[in-house]
Amino acid sequence: MRIDVVLDAMASRDVDAMVLGREANARTVADTRRLWLAGTRAFSPSCVVIRERAAVHVLSNSDDAVPAGFPVERLYGITWNPEKLVAALAAIPGLAEAERVAVDGMTPLMHTLLSRAAPAAELVDAGPLLTALWSRPDPERAEGVRAAAEVASAGMAAMVDLLRPGVHPRTLRGVCAQVFATFGVTTPAFEAVVAPLDANASTWLSPERILAPHELVVLRAGALRDGWEASVSRTYRIGADSVAEQPPPEQWQPLLSACRAGATAGDLRAREAVIYGVGRGVESWPDDFALVAGGTCALEVSDARGLRQDVLLVGERNTGLLTSVI
Amino acid sequence: MTAPLCTLDLARMRRERIEKLRSAMHTAGVDVLLCCGQNNVSYATGARVPAADHVRAGCQRPVVVFERDADWPHLYTEFPEGAPIDLPHEWVHPRIGVEARNGADKLARALPGGVLALDDAPFPLWEALRDRKPLDAGVVLAPAKLTKTRDELECIRQSQALNERAMRTVRPLALPGARATDLSGAFLRAIAELGAHANTVDPVFQVMPKAIGAGPSSITGEPVFPLPTRPRELARGDVMWVDSGINLHGYASDFGATWIIGREPDDRARVQFARWRDVVDHVLTIVRPGVTAADLVRAAGTHHGGRPWLSYFYLAHGCGTDSAELPFVGTDLGDAFDASFVLAPGMVLVLEPVIWEDGSAGHRSEEIIAVTSDGYEWLSSRAELDGDFSS
């Protein structure tokens, strides 16, 4: 994303500095490519944006993690020492004077440290600012998500190929990851899932048992390719020696048709859709978020017959599918 | 392969962890522990969640509320099938969406009174709680996690053994002409099939430059490691540093090795390995309760006048529900910290010296031990590292 777009969004909210800890947010504002780690981690400043100087500072020991041309003097290094972290932050020109600093998380320890590095600052939620960025046109977004969708779709197809009675879900999970790697992609949006459709469970954790004939199972695959995300889910009935994709939920087509520019996430959620943005990772759209042409999102619809999720490219009139399962 | 340390009893392990938390809360004067970090939730309850990218994991995060004198922690999760069977169902609740204001306010209102300790919060939750002036949950979690029970150590050993076994299937594929990302694919497939509960880090298969000046740029002037694996074609003689981590029963592992691609290690690589082994063995010679981290640093000695590890990491780190946690040895926390840190039985040390010879790359591997009452025991298998250098 262009820095002037980020700075505009900061200016319109009177934010002097952003201090971000979440990797997808750092990818959004700074196009970082740091080593992928699974799961949540405690908030720690890993990307700082100073509006007045139009400067981005990134936690990294090397320029390998940032786009070509990124000024090396704006990298600050890994440290285990809170005093050194405070010193590194305090050395970022403009942070100490910042009056409004937007952050995307907090811990009690980091609150103490950040209060020393930016003593004048009122800390505010970066969420609304990031939401504004998600709705801005980003020419790289559609192609980035489309490329990730190609990988997610291929991983899903490979899992479907192996789906049969007696197969272990973890076998499919492994095959999905290996197919991703044939694209040079070693990072998932989430590890692939093969989960029975069960009212007492989510469809996000694969059981540690083999699959039985006639089970209804949900398959999920999600890839993170060059920092862009896409995912796809389908439901299958396992036959004695074949599998059959369940027909889409009844509301799938009407909801897909409703995913047009101008529709809000809240409108769609009121109709039982699960909808969120996918770009540099998951975007937790608030209910009043209006879909924009050129935007990309995940739509998930489920009923008793099964569950379906695709990634969509939103249009003014027609919305296209970026994911597919052959 | 390492030998089992005990017959693993996960329910016993979870009960003992709860008592350790309770004890640490008493000591720290904490009445309520609120955990939003998934590894801390896993420690408090044993709950499993999907392995996902950082922000997605945040959106799906489970939450734990533990009152010091309660029988069990309350678990709020979107994945009830991930809750252990020994956690009574009345303590398992539907998810609370603490990433948004409504959910954050709801949780804040439901929290019991008293001194609150918090590990990590989405900002809306922080706003809802900051008037309570929460303590950092490190005051509870760090002492509870610092020493491991026998079951915890056995989890780490099994996690490491699985990681090593997967790497044994990958090593023969690391040949000239192969792509580094193909090794990642083979590894990820292998750990899934072997029953790992999750992969925790993009597996690192990094071809090291012969000299630091060959790039990428390094702000410390040292080798840059670890970097994301790229679809680079391997060549004969490449020096590859390998690093991978998986999760089993909520516990991390840490495999680190140096592989020479397409040929036997040359004399220089063997000397580097021997020097690396020498550093580890000097440290192991003195490992026992009562020894300080500073003693370990001294035992490691120097290499070309400097410390034989990367200054931005450590000579050794702990490993548990997080892949790098206390104890830390030889970090930039400094000499005074090292001198004050005393080893005790049940602590885990992942030793990761680095021997670098600028112009001819270097050696980096990792070995894991647990401190016992009179020395140490192995959690990683030395034989798995020696493969490239045994002949």
Image (spheres, coloured by chain):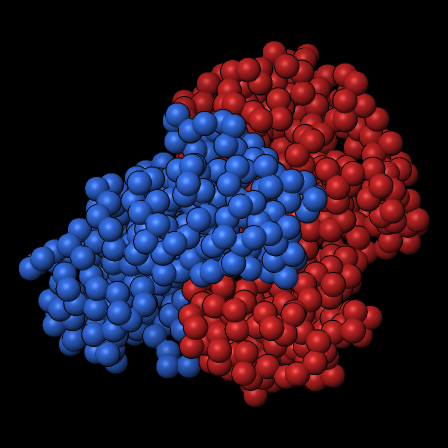
State the residue lying farthest toward the left: A317
| Viewer-closest of A319 and B287 | A319
From the top left corner, tell me how far across and down residue B67 is, in percent: 68, 80
Q: Residue at x 91, y 50 (%)?
A: B289
From the top left corner, tell me how far across and down residue B173 is, in percent: 48, 31
Q: What chain is colored red?
A: B
The tint chain A carries is blue
From the top left corner, tell me how far across and down residue B362 is, in percent: 64, 21
Q: Residue at x 73, y 59 (%)?
A: B142
> Quarter holding the N terminus of chain A?
top left
Q: Is residue A52 left or right of residue B161?
A: left
| Viewer-closest of A294 and A97 | A97
Q: Quadrant of residue A305?
A: bottom left
| Viewer-closest of B246 and A237 | B246
- In the rendered image, is residue A280 in sight? no
State the residue lying farthest toward the bottom: B90
Q: Residue at x 79, y 69 (%)?
A: B28
From the top left corner, tell me how far across and down residue B259 is, in percent: 58, 27
Q: Residue at x 48, y 74 (%)?
A: B104
Q: Is residue B108 left or right of residue A69?
A: right
User: How many labels were placed on the picture?
Assistant: 0
Q: Is residue A278 left or right of residue B361?
A: left
- In the rendered image, is residue A111 in sight? yes
